[in-house]
Image (cartoon, rainbow, N blue to C red):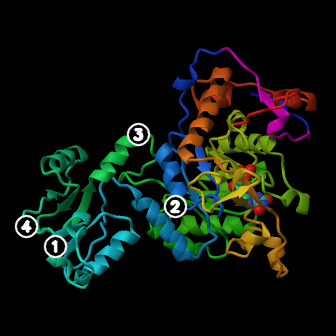
């Protein structure tokens, strides 16, 4: 489909095309927008950019809760990035399989610090053997006086008539027990009384509130993390130990020996850990990464809204052609493609799927939400948030400078991105409603009941500059633009 649109040597981007409205029997509210990348099922086919003004644990948690996937940036030490993974994995759980616990000798002060650091409302108390002897919750310590904080937790914990359940208790049965005893936490113990898990009311509530959440088999939110070519093994080791679900080799030019080697290194040590390789924009680029073992390939060079790669280096590929060409070989090799960069409106998401993408990565569109890092700035009466390229001078003073290899080699950073700001966009959940609404609407116009339909049956048409001008509000003074 659409071969004639992409024929010839001219390359196209989102604004060069429109989706042709087609016969439709589908209602936007009923279309299926689910997708699958690297064995991860996403109810919402959107992934966040691994950028230090976009994805840290709060955004990764919020995005996974609505059905997408966050990719944690790597402009952090290995330990700090692994801690971010841990925070997402601990944000909610079916059953917490390795609950944070304290020994009976711990002081109340230790317990309070631990509970604040991990934002948890209770902690099981276990002997060195792992045997559960009590549980300390906020309720036990609510009215403690300051002079009591150097006393052992055993003075305050609940230990008599402790309600527990055996290992293997289902979530449904746990709900019954939690309700019967009016408790908030249910420790699971084995035959020797050793703590093996914890089920909490909070986790059960989150599950009910977020039916589309992207979950792993243990009911924890899924998360990805970026990794470079400089410290690949050390970082991959720490991230996988923290429970990361997918690694993303995050480089500006993925059709290189360094990236191919990085994919091989990870696949050799952790064959079951999915790896997304990138970024590339050509058939040969996809082939090289898949050959090395990449499970998914990410596509886009110089398309990002904060990128100056094309201006600085003269290299790149307009994004619609890049997606189309890479998808052609991705399909042959059975590997999904993520379209990364250049998406500034929900219509661009629709176009990326028509070009064949399996998921779309967003930086600019997510940088303005509450859950993205950084404070709000008030400028000339409007609210903004900082958004900067990972190749900008500011970001490269951090740890991601190997993303842009060439400047590094001569000992100087050559920035390939800008430091900027984007309009404040409110809560991620509300924004996602708009983006997903736009995608559904596009599928309605195309008559596509699923993303596969959109990919295989929708027609694109090339437009002129006049057509583009007609697409935007024109010949009016816009009073409100939301
Ligand atoms: P959007 O358009 O969503 O693009 O803002 C986000 C993507 O842009 C890439 N990226 C960069 N590319 N210089 C570049 O050439 C940079 O400084 C830079 N920072 C991020 C990245 O692929 C991201 O997902």
Asked whether the residues under the numbered discs 4 and 2 touch, taking CB atoms below 8 Å apart as contact, a structural biologist would say no
Q: Which residue is mark 4?
A: 160
Distance between mark 2 and mark 1 Cα atoms:
32 Å
Give x and y (percent) for residue 353: 67, 36
Please report whichever mark, 4 or 2, sits nearer to the chain's N-terminal start.
2
Q: Which residue is mark 1?
A: 131
Asked whether the residues under the numbered discs 2 and 1 touch, taking CB atoms below 8 Å apart as contact, a structural biologist would say no
**Mark 3: which secondary structure?**
loop
- Residue 57, disc: 2
Residue 51 seen from this side: yes
Quadrant in the picture for the N terminus: top right
**Mark 1: which secondary structure?**
loop
Please report whichever mark, 2 or 3, sits nearer to the chain's N-terminal start.
2
Give x and y (percent) for residue 178: 18, 50
**55 over 406 or under it: above or below:** above
**172 over 419 or under it: above or below:** above
Asked if the magenta segment contains residue 11, the reply would be yes
Q: Residue furthest left?
A: 161
Q: Residue furthest front?
A: 381
Q: Which residue range is magenta in the image?
A: 9-23
Q: How many marks?
A: 4
Give x and y (percent) for residue 59: 55, 55
């Amino acid at each position: 489909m659409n071969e004639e649109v992409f024929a010839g040597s001219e390359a196209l981007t989102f604004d060069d095309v429109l989706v042709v409205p087609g016969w439709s029997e589908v209602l936007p509210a009923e279309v299926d927008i689910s997708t699958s990348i690297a064995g991860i099922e996403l109810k919402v086919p959107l992934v966040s950019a691994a950028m230090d003004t976009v994805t840290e644990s709060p955004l990764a948690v919020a995005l996974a809760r609505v059905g997408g996937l966050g990719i944690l940036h790597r402009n952090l030490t290995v330990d700090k990035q692994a801690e971010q993974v841990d925070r997402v994995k601990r944000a909610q759980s079916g059953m917490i399989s390795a609950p944070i616990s304290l020994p009976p000798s711990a002081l109340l002060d230790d317990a309070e610090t631990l509970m604040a650091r991990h934002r948890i409302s209770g902690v099981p108390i276990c002997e060195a053997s792992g045997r559960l002897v009590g549980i300390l919750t906020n309720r036990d310590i609510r009215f403690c006086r300051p002079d009591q904080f150097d006393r052992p937790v055993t003075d305050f914990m609940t230990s008599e008539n402790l309600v527990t359940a055996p290992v293997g208790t289902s979530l449904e049965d746990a709900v019954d027990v939690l309700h019967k005893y009016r408790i908030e936490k249910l420790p699971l113990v084995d035959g020797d009384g050793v703590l093996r898990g914890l089920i909490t009311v909070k986790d059960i509530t989150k599950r009910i509130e977020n039916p589309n959440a992207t979950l792993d088999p243990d009911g924890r939110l899924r998360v990805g993390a970026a990794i470079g070519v400089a410290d690949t093994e050390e970082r991959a080791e720490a991230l996988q130990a923290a429970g990361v679900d997918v690694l993303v080799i995050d480089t500006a030019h993925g059709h290189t020996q360094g990236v191919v080697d990085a994919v091989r290194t990870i696949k050799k040590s952790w064959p079951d850990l999915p790896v997304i390789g990138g970024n590339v924009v050509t058939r040969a680029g996809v082939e090289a990464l898949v050959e090395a073992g990449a499970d998914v390939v990410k596509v886009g060079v110089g398309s990002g809204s904060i990128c100056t790669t094309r201006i600085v280096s003269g290299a790149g590929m307009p994004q619609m052609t890049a997606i189309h060409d890479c998808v052609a070989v991705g399909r042959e090799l059975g590997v999904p493609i993520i379209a990364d960069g250049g998406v500034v409106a929900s219509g661009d998401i629709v176009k990326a799927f028509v070009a064949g993408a399996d998921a779309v990565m967003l930086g600019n569109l997510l940088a303005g939400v509450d859950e993205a890092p950084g404070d709000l700035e008030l400028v000339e009466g409007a609210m903004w948030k900082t958004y900067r390229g990972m190749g900008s001078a500011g970001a490269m003073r951090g740890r991601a400078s190997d993303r842009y290899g060439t400047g590094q080699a001569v000992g100087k950073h050559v920035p390939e991105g800008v430091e900027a700001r984007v309009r404040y966009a409110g809560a991620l959940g509300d924004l996602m409603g708009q983006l997903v609404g736009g995608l559904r609407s596009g599928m309605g116009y195309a008559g596509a009941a699923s993303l596969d339909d959109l990919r295989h049956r929708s027609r694109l048409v090339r437009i002129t500059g006049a057509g583009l001008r007609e697409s935007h509000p024109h010949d009016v003074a816009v009073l409100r633009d939301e």
